[in-house]
C-alpha cells in the first residue's frame, strides 16, 4: 500500500522540478531591438548641416526658417521600413553624434538638442513607408 502512495508523490515532485526549470517562451510579437550603430559614418543633411541624416536619405520637402517660423522643416520618405526601426536607428544616430535626447515617445517622436540646436522629429506610418518630419533650428 505504501508503494502506491510513494509513486504519485515522486511523480508530483518530479513534475514540480521540471516545471520550475522550464525556460520562459520567447514572444515573437515583441519588437526586436536593433544593435547600436557604431561603425557607421555619420552623414549630415544638406540643408541642415549640423543635423545627422537618417542613412543619407534626401528630403522630399524643405521649408527654411523665417520670421514666421523659427524652425526649418524637412520631410523625408523612407521606403519599406517600420516606425520602430526608424525610431531606434535615428535615436542611436543622434546619440552617437552627441545629441541629448530630451524626450522620446516610443516609435512616434524624438526631441533632441545639441549645443544651440534643437530638433523635433516626428515619425509617421504611411502604408509600407515611413514619413519622417524634422523641425529644427
Image (tube, rainbow, N blue to C red):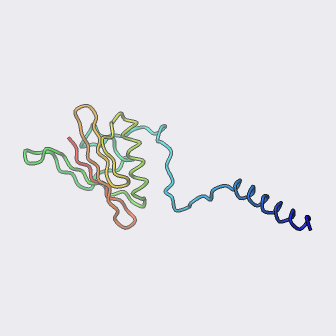
Q: Quadrant of the C terminus?
A: top left
Most distant residue in the top direction: 115
Instruction: Depth check: give the residue in front, 24 or 61.
Output: 24
Locate residue 4, reporting x and y percent: 89, 68
Q: Is residue 113 above or below residue 22?
A: above
Q: Is residue 80 left or right of residue 26?
A: left
Q: Is residue 20 left or right of residue 58?
A: right
Name which residue lies at 40% across and 52% down: 86
Q: Is residue 96 left or right of residue 134?
A: right
Locate residue 114, reporting x and y percent: 28, 34
Q: Quadrant of residue 9?
A: bottom right
Q: Is residue 128 left or right of residue 45?
A: right
Name which residue lies at 19% across and 46% down: 72
Locate residue 66, reporting x and y percent: 10, 45
Q: Quadrant of the N terminus?
A: bottom right
Instruction: Depth check: give the residue in front, 97 or 100.
Output: 100
Q: Is residue 57 above or below residue 79?
A: above
Mark count: 0
Most distant residue in the left direction: 67
Locate residue 47, reporting x and y percent: 24, 43
Name which residue lies at 39% across and 57% down: 83
Name which residue lies at 24% across and 50% down: 74
Amino acid at each position: 500500500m505504501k508503494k502506491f502512495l510513494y509513486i504519485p508523490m515522486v511523480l508530483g515532485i518530479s513534475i514540480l522540478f521540471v516545471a520550475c526549470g522550464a525556460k520562459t517562451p520567447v514572444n515573437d510579437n515583441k519588437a526586436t531591438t536593433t544593435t547600436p550603430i557604431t561603425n557607421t559614418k555619420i552623414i549630415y543633411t544638406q540643408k541642415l548641416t549640423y543635423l545627422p541624416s537618417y542613412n543619407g536619405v534626401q528630403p522630399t520637402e524643405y521649408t527654411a526658417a523665417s520670421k514666421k517660423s523659427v524652425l526649418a522643416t524637412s520631410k523625408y520618405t523612407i521606403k519599406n521600413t517600420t516606425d520602430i526601426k526608424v525610431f531606434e536607428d535615428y535615436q542611436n544616430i543622434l546619440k552617437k553624434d552627441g545629441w541629448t535626447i530630451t524626450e522620446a515617445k516610443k516609435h512616434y517622436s524624438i526631441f533632441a538638442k545639441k549645443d544651440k540646436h534643437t530638433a523635433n522629429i516626428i515619425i509617421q506610418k504611411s502604408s509600407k513607408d515611413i514619413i519622417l518630419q524634422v523641425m529644427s533650428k
